[in-house]
Amino acid sequence: LENNTSLTYLSLKGNAYGISSRGQTMMLKLVNDISSIKATLRSNHTLKYLLVAVASEIHRQINYAIAINNNYGRYYPEAAGKEKVIQTQLLSTNRAELCRLQEVDHHSVFSEIDPIHLPEVLSLLGERHGQGELYVALISSIMSLFSTMSREGCIQQEKEYYVAEIAEYRAKIAENKAKLEELDR
């Protein structure tokens, strides 16, 4: 099922004993593997209906992933994959819940993103999920953002700041010196 790109309907309702928790977790990973961004993009994006007899927290997440599959149609599975990344990898509450359900370490997803692309991802995150999520993402990714700057550029910028500050103080000293000379006359 993992690499199947033609299956659109799966019914497991006839199973008299239901699906075990482990089986449900495997089905969730099939349609939205949260272990990494690449795993989410490699998940199944063609399954449109999954019928099971058991309603559970895991089944709710399976239905959410399948709803994304349905919204992007059979001919755009890549778009469904991207939407799953945006809705589940980049939304901290969804990611935390999926990590818990799939028993995956809840590490920062931003370490997987090339620092060059991080500003674009953060912009998209702010547009789609609001300032609260953007703030959470910035906290998680601040070191990656700094790694995009060259150390030499940072040192040069700091030097220019202090040179400008020294010039400002020299101007104030000259101004005060002129005022003192005026007072002495």
Image (cartoon, rainbow, N blue to C red):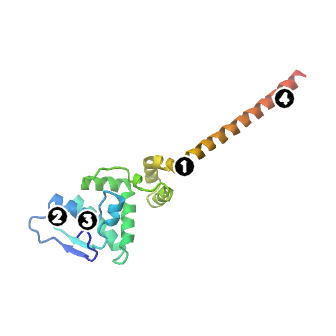
Q: Amino acid at mark 3?
A: Leu
Which is nearer the N-term, disc 2 or disc 1? 2
Quadrant position of residue 151: top right
Q: Amino acid at mark 1?
A: Met
Q: Amino acid at mark 4?
A: Ala
Determine crowd level at label 3: few under 14, some 14-19, many 20+ residues with C-alpha closer than 10 A.
many
Tags 4 and 2 touching, CB below 8 Å: no
Residue 181: assigned label: none
Q: Secondary structure at mark 4?
A: helix
Q: Residue under label 2, please give it.
A: 54
Q: Position of residue 110 (x, y in %)?
A: 41, 53
Q: Which residue is at 62% across, 40% downward?
A: 158
Q: Which residue is at 39% across, 70% downward?
A: 79
Determine crowd level at label 1: few under 14, some 14-19, many 20+ residues with C-alpha closer than 10 A.
few
Mark 2–mark 1 distance (CA, rounded to whole Å): 51 Å
Q: Residue under label 3, please give it.
A: 30
Tags 1 and 4 touching, CB below 8 Å: no
